Amino acid sequence: MTEQEAYDRLTDFIQDYIYEKKWEHLNSMQIEAVEKVLIRRKNLLFTAGTAMGKTEAALMPAITHICECPSDSVGILYISPLKALINDQFERIEEMLAGTQVQITRWHQDAAVSKKERLLFCPGGILQTTPESLEAMLCRCPQRVRTLFSDLRYVIIDELHYFMGNLRGLQLLAILERIQRIVQVIPVRLGLSATISDTKGALAYLSAGSGREAEAIGYRDERRQYFVSVTATRLKKVDYPDTYCKKIFEQSLGKRALLFTNSRRECEILISHIRRMAIKAGQPDCYYIHHGSISKGIREDTERCMKESEGPVLTGTTLTLELGIDIGDLDEVIQASQPMQISSMVQRVGRSGRKTLTSCISFHLRHYEASDGILENLDLSLVRTIAMIELYFREKHLEQVKVPRCPLNLLVHEVLAVICEKGCLQPPHLAETVLELSVFQGISQEDLRLVLRTMIQKDFLKVYEDGAVGLSDTGEKICCSMGFYAVFEADETFSVYWNNNTIGTVDRAYKTDERFFLAGKTWTVLGCDLKHKRIDVEPGKEKADIHFNGKGSLQTDRRTMEKIHRILTEDDEYSYLDEEAAGVLREVRSLARVFQLDELLVKEPGTKNLLLFPVLGTDTIRTLFYLWRSGGISCEKVLLRGLLYGIRVFAMDESALKSKVRQILASGCRVDCAFLLKKERAEGKYFDMLPGELKFKELCQDVLDLKGAAAFMKKFDGG
C-alpha cells in the first residue's frame, strides 16, 4: 500500500485532521498500519520512539473502521497505565474527533459521572480507562460489561512495556479474557511501546488469550541525534552538597527541562535546593514538582505550565512524567543519579527534542569516595551509567522483560474477583473459570486447591451446604474496598492541606511544629488528625527533609554487568565525561585493580575468605547465593553501594568450594525453603497469605534464575 492509498483509505475527517495539522507525510508505520488493521485484522505491536506517531498509527485505521461499520457498543477500548496519561490523550483524540458523531469517554475514578451515565445510555465510540477501573466494572456491575462491549472491535494498550513483566500486566490480560467470555467477542489488540527489547515476548504477551496472530511494525527516524553528557561530584559529609545542586541549577538555567530522580525524596530535596539558589541569584521561580505524592491539582497545573509556558522551566519528577504525557517540547532531560534501567533511560531521553529531533540528556552523578579499603564502599554508579549509555546509544540494547510464570498471589485476587463477579460457584466451575485464563498456564489444579483451602482457613471464603464456594463477610469487605481492584500494595498515607487546599500526601504522621518538604517547598505542621489522616500545614522558611516508603530495586542484567566489567578492566575514554567524571573513572578503575574485580575468584586479603565476581545479572547472582547457602557454603552477597556484584565465601579454599559446588549440582540445585522465605517475597499484596510451599514455588519460578545459576556452576566447576 502506498502512502496515497493509505491516506485515501482513511475516513474523511481523519484526512482533514492530517491536513489541518500540516503533516508532511504519513510515516512507514502509519502506512503499514492502515493495511494491517483494516484488511488483515491482526493483533499489532507498534514499536517506535516517543512522539513518532504510534497512537495515531493505531487509532486512525481503528476509528475509520468503526465509522464505516458502526458498532452497537463501544468500538475501541483504550487502556492506559495512568489516569494522567488518559486525560492527556483524551484531549488529543477529542481534537481528532471534533465535529463528528464519534464520542470519546474517560472512565476512571476522577472522571465525570454524567459522562459515564451518558455512555451507558448510548454506548459507542472510544472508552479510555485503566485496568483497575475495568476490574471495578467487572466486579460491581458485570452487566455493564455486556452493555458497553457487546460489539467491541479493538483494544489498544498504551505503554505496553509498562504492563509487561509485572502482576498489573497479568491482571490486565485476565480482565480482557473475562470480558471476552462475557460478550463472546474477541477484539483486535493493538499495543504501543517505545522500549521493547524482546519482540517475540511482547507479541506473546499482547496476544495471550486472544487466539489471534500478532506481528510487530515499527518506525525509527534516523535523523534523530542524541547529545549526552556526564558529570560527577565527589561526596564527603553531605549527600546533596551545594556544589552538586549548583551544577544542575546551571545546567538547567534558561532551558525548558525535566529533572528525573530515582525517588520522591531526592526529587523534593533537589528542587528545594535549586529553587533556593535561583531566588538567591535573582532568577525567577520557575521550578516545579511532579510525582505520585503530589496532589492531582498541583500535578495538572505543572503539566499545563510546562505545556503552555514559553520561558525556562525545570520540573523535578520521578516516573510520573516518564511516560507520554504531553508537556510540550523540551530542551533537555537531566538525570540525577544513575538510571535504574536502560528502558527507563530511553523513555526519559525521548521527552526532549521532539520538534528539533535533537535529544539532549545530562547525567549528574554523586560519587561516594572509597578510600578506606572496604570493598563494599566502592561506588560503581558512574561505571554502571557509562555501561548503560554505551549499550543503548551504540548497541541499541534494552533489558529483556521477564513475564511472571507462576503468579500465585494474583490467583488469590482473581478468585476473589471472579466470585465477586459471578456469585458463589461450585469448585469445578470455579477451577475452570480461573485456570483457563492464559496467565495461569503454569498453575495446577493442586495449586488452586491449596489456595482455596488457605482462603477458607483465613476467612476470605466460605463453603455453603451444597459445596459451593462464596465470599465470607471478610471477603465481601475486601472486595467492596476501593483498594481491592489494584493488585499492587498501596502505602498508608496522610493528606496534607494548606488553607483547605490539598498539597499532596506523606507516608507518616508528623507532630505539630515539625517541618517537611513537599511540592518543592518547606511546610510547618499546624496539626495532625490521626483519625481522618489529615495534616494541616503552613509555609515554612527553614530547611527540612522528607522520607517516603518504598525503594527502587537496582536490577542489572547480565549484558550490563559484562559491560561494567569491560569498562573497569579496559582503558577506553569517553568524550561525554566532564573532567571530574573522567577523574572519578580513573580512580574507580585503580581501586577495581586493587580489589581484583577483573578476576573470577580471589582470596580476600588478610582473611581466609574467597571473593567470587561472576559477571552475571542480579537475579543469577542472588540465586547462586541461595543455592550455596542451602548447600552448606557459608557466604554472603557482596553489594557495592547497592549493586550486587559478587559473593563472599567464608573460611574456604578453592578446592573445597568446587567440591561443594559439585555436590550442589549433583543434588539437583535445591534451595532451602525456610531460608528463602525469610529473605525474599514476590510482588503482590496477597503473597504473605499464601501457604509456604506456594510462596516457595512462586519465588523459585519468578524471582530466582535457577537455570542460569546452574549453568554458571557447571562452567565454574569445569574451569
Image (cartoon, rainbow, N blue to C red):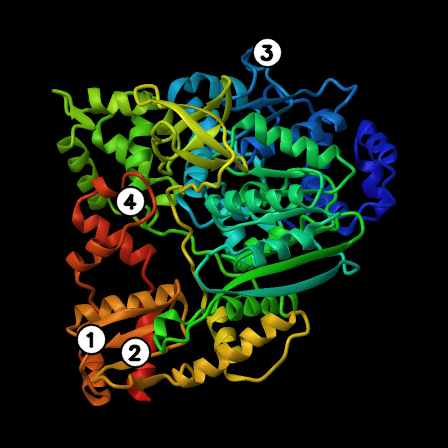
Q: Residue at x 37, y 35 (%)?
A: 507
- Looking at marks 2 and 4 on the same chain, the residue that comes earlier in the sequence is marked by 4
In the picture, measured across the screen, residue 181 lies left or right of residue 129, that is left
In the depicted structure, whether residue 429 falls above or below residue 655: above
The percent coordinates of residue 483 (x first, y second) are 36, 28
Type of amino acid under label 1: Ile
Spatial CA span between label 4 and label 3: 39 Å
Q: Which residue, given by chain and number where applicable, does mark 2 sit on?
A: 713
Relative image position of residue 220 (x, y in whole percent) = 72, 56
Q: Position of residue 296 (x, y in %)?
A: 54, 27
**Labelled pair 2, 1 in contact (Cβ < 8 Å):** yes
User: Does residue 154 appear anywhere in the picture?
Assistant: no
Foreground tag (2 vs 4): 2
Quarter of the image where one finds residue 454: top left
| Helix, strand or loop for disc 3 | helix
What amino acid is at disc 2?
Met
The total number of labels drawn is: 4
Question: Looking at the image, is mark 4 or mark 3 earlier in the sequence?
Answer: 3
Q: Amino acid at mark 4?
A: Leu
